[in-house]
Each structure stands twice: as C-alpha cells, then as structure tokens.
Amino acid sequence: MKEQTNMMQFQKILVPLDGSSLAEEAIPLAVHIARACNAEVYLLRVVPPSSCVPLYPYAPLELAEPMREAAFTKARDYLKQVVTSAHLDALKVHIDVQMGGSAATIIDTARVYGIDLIVMRSHGETGFTRWVMGSTAQQLVRYCPVPVLVIRGTQSQLLPLVHAPRILVALDGSSLSEEAIRPAAQLSAALAQVGQGSIHLTRVVERLITHRQKEKDIVEQQNKACRAEAEAYLHQIKERFSSGELASFGLTVTGSVVTYSDIEDITRRIIEESSCIGDEPGFTGCDIIAMTTHGRHGFQHFLFSSFTEAVFDAAPQPILVVHAAKTDHGSQSSKQKETNKQKKADVVVF
C-alpha cells in the first residue's frame, strides 16, 4: 500500500460493462487505481430496453415486467461472477444494473453515485450495432462531466507496467486545457510507485509561415517570441508541481513545445510527441494522453471540430479525457491574458 499523502485521490471509480470479455479488460486497470487510492469500485451493466423486452415500449405490461426482471437477474448474476473471477473481493465493490441507452445511463449513474473517474475499454460494441448506435466511449468523451480513462485499440491492458508511467498532458495555453492537469497528476501518482510518476506537458503553438522574402525575418522573430512565451508558460506550470498546489503528488515533470503550420496537423503533432518522448533505456513514449474537451455538439462542433476527439480516434495509447467547465472558451491563464492584450492570442481550443 502506498504512503498516504494529502493530495486529492480518486474515491469512486466506475467501470461500465456490456457483457463482453473486451469490456472486462478495463477491470485490472480500474482495480490497480482503486487499490492505490483506497477507492470504491462500481461495476455497471446497462441493459438496452429492446434487448430484454421485445417491441419495447409497446409490449403489454404483464409480459414486459417478467422479461425485464429476468434480464436484470441475468445481468446481476453476470456482475457477481465478474466480481469473483476478477478477484475484487478485497475491495469495496458495488454492482448496479440499469436499463437505458448506454452513454446517457452511464453519465446519469456517475452523477448519482458521485463517481470521480470512469475507466472503460473502447469498442465494446462491434459490427452493425456500433455503426448504427455509435461508440459509447466516443459519446462519453464528448458529453461526460466526469473524467473518462479509455483503453484503446489493440492495447487490451495497460498493466503490468515495467517502467515508471508517463502521462502526456496536451495544453493550448488556456485555463480550460489546464483542467486536465490535476486528474492526470492523480492518475500518474496512482499508477506509479511513490515518487516515480511522471507528467509531460506539451504546449501546442502555431508556427507562422510566409513566402514573401521581405517578411521572413519579421515572421521568424514572431515565431521565436511565441516559442519563448510557450516555454515560459510551461515553466510556470512546472512550478506548480515543484512548490505549488501540485507538489504533494511527487511527480517528475518535463515539458516540450510543439508547433504546427496547418491546423489539420495538430492531432498528428500531439500523437507524434507522445510517441517520441523518453529518457529510460528501452522505453520511449507516453503511456497515456490527457486532454480536456469542451463537449461541443451540433453545428458548433462541426464548425470548430474537436482536437480531443481526433486524438481519441487516432492515438494508440489510452486517453484520459476531462470535460472542461462551462466558461469562456478563449479563457487563459492570468499571465497570458496580460500578455495577449498587445498581440493576437495563439490559443488552440481542443
């Protein structure tokens, strides 16, 4: 058991399950975090109404209710079996069965129980069902107010780690993007041995390009000034880990500035950075990418796009997504607000 510190830890962890072995691959990671934080684990099985009550909601009540009870009993038995087979007996585990749409029901359940972290495996649905209904993980990434840690792609499990885990936090200089820092720090501290966790801060900035010879020197000076400002910003964030409110996590913190010339390259640059960082023999890259999202939808989502969702779709690593508070999308740290009074802000809203 890790030494107790005064840092905030995850206390209630939710693992959504759909009955598949693929979804169950999230359990070892959730258990590891729960043991490190002395947290409670909630296993949730969402039962779609149409799967247990044919012709729902038009089935006669005298037929629908027995079918519903049978489906709930089967789901509870499944969760009890999971608790036994996953060796969760030593933890405080709660099981719950709910009927409804997957993403909306998971979010409602998280609110009811005061969940502070959801751990899940993406692509629990397959084939036609996933194509029609969309990915539950993608919907949670966009709308869930609770931090969501999604295990991705062919990497079925993050554990066991044979090195000190490193989490990349992608920042655009706004206070909204900084909301991913504390959850990422909590997660890094939970996954690592005491004093061995690591955070890498990546600041994304635009690199201006001109094809006019007489403007090249001016543009280059602007690019140098922009990079210097980004490096000063990262130094400011690092100080919060060394002597500020994040110091109690005991993490090693590194940082880098990555540039883009075309806005379409932002996703690629973040993923490239996450794969090339490393200072340990035989180990290169970050284990997890952490980002905030603003949860846009409809026309606004289409217009502005979402770099977090793009990284979620393309990155091979697990991704920790933190839903930013509903404040001004262009809000920035206090130092940047003062600086940007004199020049155009270079904030990239994820």
Image (cartoon, rainbow, N blue to C red):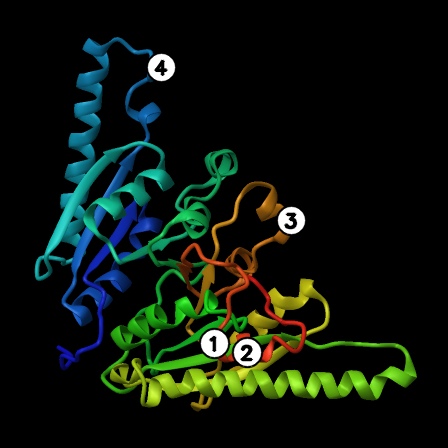
Mark 1 highlights which residue? 334
Q: Earlier in the sequence, mark 4 or mark 2?
A: 4
The residue closer to the viewer here, 304 or 96, is 304
Label 4, secondary structure: give it: loop
Mark 3 highlights which residue? 303
How far is mark 3 from mark 1, CA to CA?
28 Å
Q: Residue at x 13, y 79 (%)?
A: 4
Q: Position of residue 138 (x, y in %)?
A: 46, 48
Q: Earlier in the sequence, mark 3 or mark 1?
A: 3
Mark 2: few/some/many CA within 10 Å (<14, 14-19, 20+): few
Q: Earlier in the sequence, mark 3 or mark 2?
A: 3
The amino acid type of the residue labelled 2 equals: Glu
Label 2, secondary structure: give it: helix
How far is mark 1 from mark 2, CA to CA?
7 Å
User: Contact, CB < 8 Å: mark 4 with mark 2?
Assistant: no
How far is mark 4 from mark 3, CA to CA?
38 Å
How far is mark 1 from mark 4, CA to CA?
56 Å
User: Contact, CB < 8 Å: mark 4 with mark 3?
Assistant: no
Mark 4 highlights which residue? 55
Quarter of the image with the C terminus is bottom right
Label 1, secondary structure: give it: helix
Compared to residue 333, the image places residue 41 above or below, namely above
Mark 2 highlights which residue? 338
User: Contact, CB < 8 Å: mark 1 with mark 2?
Assistant: yes
Q: Residue at x 27, y 52 (%)?
A: 15
Q: Looking at the image, is mark 4 or mark 2 nearer the viewer?
A: 2
